[in-house]
Image (cartoon, helix red, strand yellow):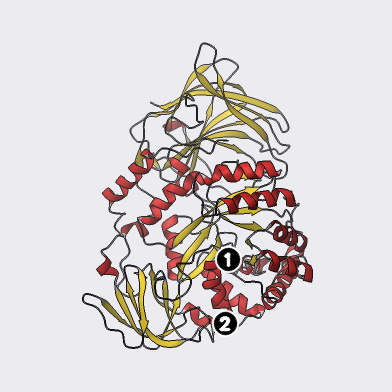
Amino acid sequence: MTATVSRARPLALLTALLLASGQACVVASAADNDVLIRNAMVFDATGRAPYAASVLVQDGRIAAIGADLKAPAHTRQVDARGQALLPGLFDLHTHWTPNAEPATLPQIANRYLAAGVTTVSDFHQPPEAYAPRRAWLQSIAAPDVKFAARMSTPLGHGADWGDENTTRWVNSPEAATAAVKQVAAYKPDFIKAFTDGWRYSNAADNSSMDEETLAALVKEAHRQQLRVFTHTVMVKRGKTAARAGVDALAHSVQDGPADAELIALMKQHGTRYSPSLAVYLPERVDGSGKARAGTEAYRQREANFANALRNVKTLHDAGIPIVLGTDAGMTGTPHGASTLRELELFVQAGLTPTEALLAGTRASAEALALDDRGSIEVGKRADLLLVTGKPWERIGDIRNTQQVYVAGRQVVGKGVQLPAGNRAASLPPLRIGALVDDFERADQRTALDTLRNDDADGGNDRTVQVTDVIDRDGGGKALSMQARLSSKDDAYAGVILPLTRGSVAPADLRGWKGVRVEVRGDATLRLEARGLQGRRWAAPVAANGRWQTVEIPFRALQGQPPYRAKGPLPAWRGDDVQQLVFTGTGDAGAKIWFEIDNVRFY
């Protein structure tokens, strides 16, 4: 799969639409955001005990800290007497997934701001989505979101449901080196490597990454000045990750106690520890696990969690930096609330409230090499959290949020009015051209300048497919898809044609009547349109061994059940579609093929 970065035109259209719709209205003059926070009890995360002081913010930075600061002209003043001022919190491990609740970017951003989380790492997005999501985030009030490029082994965890444009598959040092170079073109903020296939004794294990491959991945990532986090949940795999030089373990090792060898290796290589206790809490942060209490799976979760708690304390006492990540977005682990619960779980594990706060601020900033934040010091970004109480004594006080500032701009607190985009569930729909793809571009991108993706059933028994552009008899190109279906009854293989870059913004198709495509193949084919909030519509596509032109009117598209959920079938609107997907099915284990060309709206 190519890693070519798309041209700027779709992003220019997106920016223009944001401005026209009034969503891109968060930029204010420096004076509007200048503030003097007076008489606060400052927890500055430098190791100094909390102290009474005022903090002056100018141009999004901390300009001065002192007892008797004077407010410059036109500077807003906040009386924080009786309140605590802390650096904004971090969550270094989240998934902004469309399968969670909330599922939409502005609403997820709102949850983090309300919790005082001002820097978030998103492990979920394909590289194609970085640029449009960054543009969207800049148009609203939001935490600073850092994006991880994902890498795993073939059929490994994280690679068992998406294609290589979502998670790169690497199984040799050469493949790992090449993959890092390819994703670096998209300017990720760091890399997540899924190195451990253990599924917590509750599911079949996936494949794991060998040490030589991981070491090569880390070496190239560091050459590109990218930190590497790993999905690591076993003690022996933690040792592998540390020897390979990873910067942080992004999960708890929980199959047993952290031993002296693991501690020594993590110290030697400077490996940090982000235990994501919130996602392993047996009863879940949202309480959804209680109904399963007493089952064997629940007892296994309890045993794993007990190991996880002990290992946090063991590693912390040994001098391994603990940092804050939750895996929020996964089942029972809500955005924002899980970050605060993680701090409480650190204390439950044996850290003091002060140590927990340091893990969630300065230590987390250092884990991503963000030296401009994480503490309250002159010159640092004014990412600030004002709460009632003394969370360095009672960690639960961190929930008493009064005000939150991101780069000096107040985003939470009495009187704050967020941009309209923070209330929207999606970006405005984009008008696009009639031609979706004629497969003539040499860079493997569609005529709409989007990156095609493969789509197949997931899991350890997975359909194997090869999708490639081929020459047509008589001239021109077409897309060929060949697959051997898995043994599952619902096995399928397909190709996704995104209508906008990264399938982030919806497309407006209301000016057309349907889809026209030239097609042939030996498979049961259908066209699926996928849209916002998991909405799907589908219609059969007639195909045989000879080329024919088929028209599928939008009125023929039938609403489909929500993915992995129950709910009403969606009605066709036409202004909320993000992808066209051609899928083929057949008998379990069978070989299928189809070819398509000149996909367009009519």
Q: Residue at x 54, y 69 (%)?
A: 339
The quadrant where residue 66 appears:
bottom left
Q: CA distance from mark 2 to mark 1?
A: 17 Å
Q: Amino acid at mark 2?
A: Pro
Q: Residue at x 56, y 33 (%)?
A: 495
Q: Is 399 drawn above or below residue 533 in the view shown?
A: below
Q: Is 409 drawn above or below residue 329 in the view shown?
A: below
Q: Residue at x 69, y 59 (%)?
A: 232
Question: What residue did someone put label 2 on?
Answer: 353
Nearest the camera: 116 or 494? 116
The x, y position of residue 313, in whole percent, is 69, 77
Say the numbered circle drawn on residue 82: none
Residue furthest toward the left?
73
Q: Is 301 drawn above or below residue 63 in the view shown?
A: above
Whether residue 45 appears in this view of the structure is yes
Q: Residue at x 51, y 17 (%)?
A: 548
N-terminal of the pair, mark 2 or mark 1, is 1
The quadrant where residue 234 appears:
bottom right
Per the image, label 2 sits on a secondary structure element best described as helix
The C terminus sits in image quarter: top left
The x, y position of residue 169, in whole percent, is 65, 43
Question: What residue did someone put label 1 on?
Answer: 325
Q: Amino acid at mark 1?
A: Gly
The x, y position of residue 435, in whole percent, is 40, 27
